[in-house]
Amino acid sequence: MNPFLKLLTILLMLDDAPEAQRRWRQLVSIMVAVFALHILWSCGWGAKVGLSSGFAQVTDIVEIKAQLALAADVATAVKIRLLKKSIIDTRILQCNADSKRYYTQRLEELTDEYFQDTKAIFSVPDCGDLR
């Protein structure tokens, strides 16, 4: 007999024999015990016997938050550095271009983004300072 069908037969007590009732009680007892152990483990009581502590603990979350904050700070610093480089590169291209309209618009976009990220105005160098 298929194991799934056998389990289904036991769970639904399709047999009226006393042995079927005994098997059903054993299966339900095992399922209740497994459920209870799972609850104990997930609440952290398994740590007392050397198991891992089910859910994330506050210390784990604090550590992860600190790592994420550090990563965000590093990403922001890299972004600001790249913005500065892009502003200078765009300014160099603007100074050397015949038509300056595109580079002027791009320079305004970059300096606006720099201001949004740093809340400081970027001092764009003069063309003579870049030669």
Image (cartoon, grey):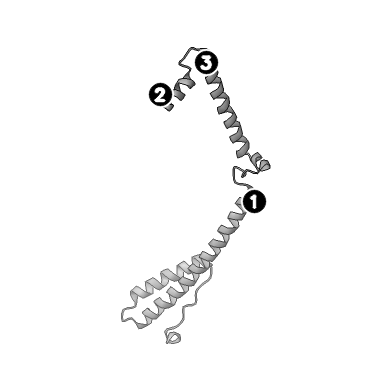
Image-based side of 88 in relation to 28, left or right: left
The quadrant where residue 110 appears: bottom left
| Residue type at the position of mark 3 | Glu
Is 99 on the left-hand or right-hand side of 26?
left
Q: Toward the viewer: 23 or 75?
A: 23
> How far apart are the alpha carbons under marks 1 and 3?
51 Å
Image quadrant in which the C terminus is located: bottom left
Residue at x 45% of width, y 20% of height: 9
Disc 2 or disc 1, which is closer to the eye?
A: 2
Disc nearer the start of the sequence (1/3) = 3
Q: In percent of the image, x 45 and y 68: which residue is there?
A: 112
Q: What is the tally of numbered marks visible in this picture?
A: 3
Image location (x, y in percent) of residue 75? 51, 64
Which numbered circle lies on residue 1?
2
Nearest to the eye among marks 1 and 3: give it: 3
How far apart are the alpha carbons under marks 2 and 3? 17 Å
What residue does disc 3 label? 19
Dot 3: within a 10 Å radius of its alpha carbon, few (fewer than 14), some, or many (20 or more) residues?
few
The foreground one among 81 and 70 is: 70
The amino acid sitting under disc 2 is Met
Callout 1, which amino acid? Thr
Which disc, if any, is residue 59?
Answer: 1
Relative to residue 100, is residue 78 drawn left or right? Answer: right
Marks 3 and 2: in contact by CB < 8 Å? no
User: Distance of mark 2 from mark 1, alpha carbons?
Assistant: 50 Å
